[in-house]
Amino acid sequence: MKKLAAFVAALFFTATAFAQTTDNTVSAKINGKEWTAKAQRLNLPFTGVKYLAIAGMAVNPDVQTWIRLVYTDELKPGTYTIIQENDSEMEKQYKKANGNVMWALVDYTSETKGLGHAFSDGESWKGTVTITSVTPNSIEGTFDATLKGATYKKRGLATVSGFGLRQNLEDKVITAAGGGMLTKSGPHDHDNTKRTATDEEIKLTDGKFKVSWNSSTAQKGK
């Protein structure tokens, strides 16, 4: 029922609030291999800060690259340091910027076994995101990132019961409909999985992102 409601919301989101143009993309070389996918965008106003997430999302297999920006003032062209998603690093950057927060995070996730039973992820670590152009209804930029590796494997009960499979299929349908970001709290939100850190580094080079949306929804993209 939860996934069904999310699917309905995803269709509404795609048809109205999202209203993006068809050439929106995120691309990069993933460990040297060319990759590109249609981009999705999510902009949320929180108390005191703003949150903009852009993600290239491919389906079957699921491969996603996320660029997330958290800021207090407004987005401006410039180059920003990628940080790890942990409290100590964020606090360090907060103090360094005298409260004018601009956190940039880049993450990657790839389905490694059929229908989402395991994922090979790269968690935000270091590198840069450069915003080359930003307007009330568009954003464009580049990125280069080195990510820390982690694996996520579906827990046994979810696999044996078939619940995990149904859940993954629903996620794929929603993502293909353009609402993948509505079903996830973040790039490493894999239901009923166990995380294991690895020594692997995932490199995203020559990264590019370009997203624009209709002027009628420009207020959502500020």
Image: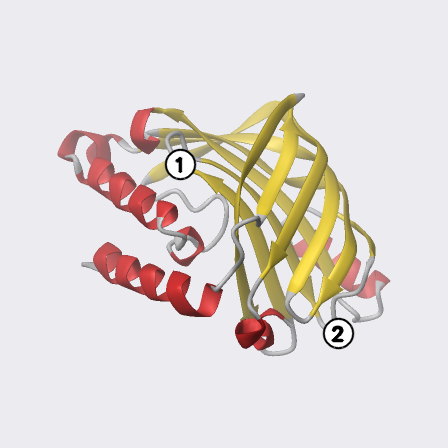
* Residue at image coords 74%, 44%: 142
Q: Position of residue 220 (x, y in %)?
A: 56, 73
Q: Earlier in the sequence, mark 1 or mark 2?
A: 1
The residue to which callout 2 is attached is 73
Look at the picture and state if 198 lies above or below 76: above
Give the position of the C terminus as an image quadrant. Answer: bottom right
The residue to which callout 1 is attached is 59
Q: Position of residue 75 (x, y in %)?
A: 74, 66
Residue 153 is left or right of residue 84, and the answer is left
- Going by the numbered disc 2, the residue's amino acid type is Asp
CA gap, disc 1 and disc 2: 34 Å
Count of marks placed on residues: 2
Q: Nearer the viewer, residue 117 or 17?
A: 17
Residue 69 is left or right of residue 20, and the answer is right
For residue 144, which quarter of the picture? Answer: top right
Residue 45 appears in the figure = no
* Residue at image coords 33%, 50%: 174
- Going by the numbered disc 1, the residue's amino acid type is Val
Q: Position of residue 61 (x, y in %)?
A: 40, 29
Residue 192 is left or right of residue 49, and the answer is left
* Residue at image coords 30%, 45%: 173
Q: Residue furthest left?
A: 161
